[in-house]
Amino acid sequence: MTACAATWLTQTLRCWFDDSDRGSRVRGLRFAPPRLEALESRNLPSAAGGVWSFVSAPRLHPMKVSELNLQPGASLNPIFVAPYDQLPNTTELVGQTGPLILDGSGNPIWFDPLSSNNRVEAIGFQAQTLFGKPVLTWWQGTLAGATSKLPPGTPRQGGHFVIFNQHYREIRSVPAPSGFSLDEHEFLITPQGDAYYFALKRVKANLTPYGGPKQGSYVDPEIQEVNLRTGKVIFTWNTAAHIPLSDSIVPLPTTPGQPWDPYHDNSIDVSPDGSQLLVSLRNTWGIYDISRKTGQVLWEIGGKQNQFRLPSDLITGPYDSAFQYQHDARYVPGGISLFDDGGSGAPPDGGPYGAGRGLILSLDLQNHTASLASPPYYHDPALDSGSQGNLQVLGNGNVFIGWGSDTQSDGELRSYYSEYSSSGSVLADFVLAGQDISYRAFSLPWVGVPLTKPAAAVIDANGQSTVYASWNGSTETVAWELLAGPRRAALSPVSITSRTGFETAIATTAAGPFYEVKALGAGGEVLKTSAVIRAHG
């Protein structure tokens, strides 16, 4: 943790927006603000597949994404993903694990590798707002694999949430409450500065009524709301106290000693007035509207206890279900949105019951009827979304979908993200490298102001020098000014080059051997200056 984040809010608020190094103007060269085309050139098509490597940032190796479709009208917001590998062998991961911000064409904006062996994972990476300030949040830890005695996909001890500010400094870590492990699926910050998440506890129980052992156990999720100023839990809602175990559609595990995962909570949303919570339970196929005041389940859609009449063409599976193993249920005006995984390989009869799809449903709460608010959103080709995924309704009415983990016909996994217009046409479609997956993907506004210096490196070849410039996390840099000279204290302006992607290569015949780069904003102001570097050879 940085010194700036040593204490929570009492000292850290002063360093959230330390811009003392910004604002000086370029001297020595006439600066013309880049044309619109130059600004757009920051979004260059990324190379297909594989791993990024940078001369000026040699420790960063994020995976690449491949552009399958990109049309005018797609959002210009940055994309938020966090690549990891579901497989037990983390050597099959392409690149490094960690939170990754991409531009609209798939080029890195900011990346934070979490470990040297890729065993530490980031889940649910996104931008949110805390006390009126933009922040980054994610769960960080290790998930149980298929060979673990924990249910696959559940968190191991030590998992926690982190909050970073606009300067990419950690300002808060939210650990697991005593006696619980901290679930990775949701971390939702409210306008009041509280946060909702799931806390998990293993409960011993007689499971013979459900086909299990007499001395068995199950995972009992609890919704908790924590005040981020004080760290105190101010609200709890226990799943097993309100939803019967018999509502689960998942059979008990056959691995000796492995607890049953009957619910698998995976999303929380808060109604606009704050009085209700919308909760998705993957393993009951149910979405529940809960009174925050009383804890009462006000209504349920999906699963064995579905309370809504659905049109016949919306029903795809057992129990007259319109979705199976769903994720990311959210309130939208007049109803809800969700990502329908389609029940790949799931009981009671194996599935899948349909391709993964995004759904926006209109709900008539008085008559308990549900209908499609818009046609379902499918990927082309159709995806077998075995797990994870999310649907985000953008401010302009477009729909952004993270497709979770798709099992291909060759048995390998793929992870996609796509954007659709309000009329349903595809505006963007990208696939992550190799078998890398991201639990969710988001299109969100973000302004990053790193406090680090820009990075620079130089390579000499055939009488010409190429200076490489980058600034991990900067969203405001539009151009680079290059300076060169015979001594560190005798540098003169050489050229101004529009920024191109994460790293910009600047070829020069100017005599060094010392070089320096300045990051320039859209008005020609110097945002920050690199260290002076020296060419060798």
Image: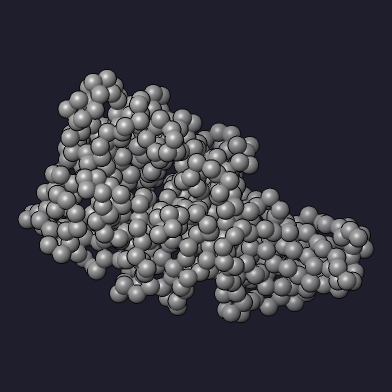
- Residue occupying the point 91% across, 60% down: 537
- In this rendered view, identify the residue nearer to me: 191 or 446: 446
- In this rendered view, identify the residue nearer to me: 332 or 244: 244
**Residue 352 position by quadrant:** bottom left
From this viewpoint, is residue 59 visible? Answer: yes
> From this viewpoint, which residue is outermost toward the front?
410
From this viewpoint, is residue 284 visible? Answer: no
User: Would you say 447 lies left or right of 480 here?
Assistant: left
- Residue occupying the point 22% across, 26% down: 207
- In this rendered view, identify the residue nearer to me: 504 or 217: 217
Question: Residue 479 at what x, y percent from top left?
Answer: 68, 69
Question: Residue 286 at what x, y percent from top left?
Answer: 22, 46
- Residue occupying the point 38% across, 27% down: 180
Question: Residue 423 at what x, y percent from top left?
Answer: 30, 74
User: Would you say 42 lies left or right of 372 here?
Assistant: right
Q: Is residue 492 above or below residue 265?
A: below
Q: Is residue 534 above or below residue 88?
A: below
Q: Is residue 268 above or below residue 495?
A: above
- In this rendered view, identify the residue nearer to me: 515 or 407: 407
> From this viewpoint, which residue is outermost toward the top?
215
Question: Residue 48 at what x, y percent from top left?
Answer: 57, 66
Q: Quadrant of the N terminus?
A: top right
- Residue occupying the point 55% across, 40% down: 119
